[in-house]
Image: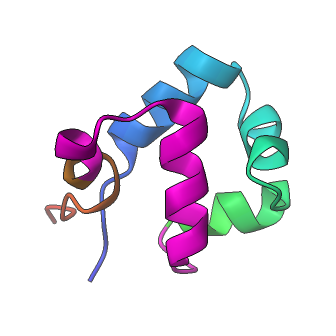
Amino acid sequence: MEYNYDKLKGRVKEIFDTQENFANAINISTTSLNYKLNNKKKWTQSEIYNSILVLQIPNNEIINYFFTKKIE
């Protein structure tokens, strides 16, 4: 199953300006982040948790950022 990360990408741009800055903030490589945002690698629970913290995503919106199914 693939997920749509457009809303997450927008939040990253809004808060960190670049994906590189965001990757550094959650302590992963930019390559790993790129794979995750393009559904080539899965997010770990700790990566999701750290992302929620640094992006200040409210609990009731987590599903919209990480679990929206991609429509083909």
Foreground of the two, 19 or 46: 46
Image quadrant where one finds the N terminus: bottom left
Q: Say if the magenta span includes residue 4.
A: no
Above or below 18: residue 41 = below
| Residue 15 horizontal side relative to residue 6, left or right | right
Q: Residue visible at 47% across and 27% down?
A: 11
Above or below 50: residue 39 = below
Q: Is residue 43 visible?
A: no
| Residue 58 horizontal side relative to residue 63, left or right | right
Q: Residue visible at 61% across and 36% down?
A: 54
Looking at the picture, the colour scheme in use is rainbow
Q: Say if the magenta span includes residue 43.
A: yes
Quarter of image, res 7: top left
Above or below 18: residue 45 = below
Q: Residue visible at 22% across and 62% down?
A: 70
| Residue 8 horizontal side relative to residue 62, left or right | right
Magenta range is 39-62
Foreground of the two, 16 or 31: 16
Image quadrant where one finds the C terminus: bottom left
Residue 64, position as x, y percentages in the image: 21, 46
Residue 10, position as x, y percentages in the image: 45, 27
Q: Residue visible at 73% across and 51% down?
A: 26
